[in-house]
Image (tube, rainbow, N blue to C red):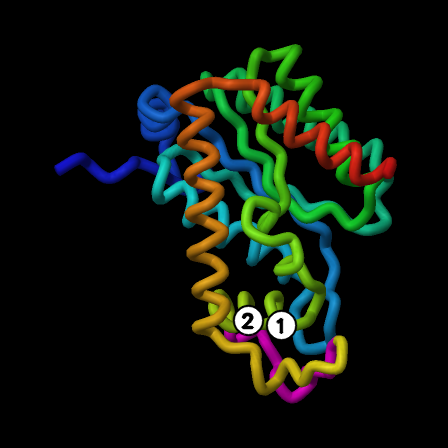
Amino acid sequence: MSAAPVWGRAIELLVCQQQQIAAGTPVCWLPWATYATYGNHLPLGSPGFITTAIVERAAQRVGGVVYPVLWRDRDLDINLFRQMLTARLAMVAGQAFQIAVVVGLPETATDDLAVMEVAESAQHQHRLLVLAVSPFELVDEKMQDHGALWETSLMLAIRPDLVDVNQIADHDRQDVRHVASPSLGQQALHLAGERLAIAVRDLLERRDTSVIAALYQQRRVRYTS
């Protein structure tokens, strides 16, 4: 019986513990999120809660170190956010990590293009494999709704104490109040975490940069078509 992957949250680890994890599984997980809410029934931190929950589920299956959410305020200039993400990638590259998994949901094409450019730059500069994806990109991007069925279900599964069901409004002619549920959210978390884990395991074993390049190219084509 193989041992369970070793993982930890960066803010909870001793330096020696982080070094041991990086030596065994040189993967760091870098969630990021926009500080915003998309419904009166959800907290401003919903994107960060969801991204972190998915990342941690994947880390439990692969191993590695999970860093705190890198927040982007809507009013923060995209170039400043690029600098913040660039600095974090340079930091983890200096800590002997070989793969960085950047997970967050861009609000615009400009945001996504900026994240991909930073990821590619770090890959060339630090020889760090950087996989930048949105939370449900490897499952179904329709699940990345805003304040509707999936986001509400996810928050009911993660932090039900922060969801005010009395303020849930209809979305796309769907009464979310009667269809969103913690069990649906748990299923979504499991699926997203497992798909992300599979992709990162493959990177860890094969170190194939062409897979990342193809993924980024697909996204760029979508924005220009």
**Which quarter of the figure has residue 116?**
top right
User: Relative to 89, does residue 150 appear above or below in the rendering?
Assistant: below
Residue at point 39% right, 22% down?
A: 205
Q: Amino acid at mark 1?
A: Leu
**Residue that carries the numbered disc 1 in the rendered image:** 149
Residue at point 72% right, 28% down?
A: 217
Say which of 10 and 110 sits in front: 110
Alpha carbon distance from label 1 to label 2: 6 Å
Where disc 1 sits, the SS reads helix
Is residue 194 toward the left or the right of residue 34 in the image? left
Disc 1 to disc 2: CB gap under 8 Å? yes
Instruction: State yes or no: residue 61 in magenta.
Output: no
Say which of 220 and 72 sits in front: 220
Residue 76 image position (x, y, % from top left): 83, 44
**Which quarter of the figure has residue 109?**
top right
Residue 126 image position (x, y, % from top left): 60, 12
Q: Amino acid at mark 2?
A: Ser
| Magenta-highlighted residues | 160-171
Res 81 visible:
no
Residue at point 29% right, 36% down?
A: 5
Residue at point 64% right, 56% down?
A: 47
Res 7 visible:
yes
Say which of 103 and 162 sits in front: 103
**Residue that carries the numbered disc 2 in the rendered image:** 153
Where disc 2 sits, the SS reads helix
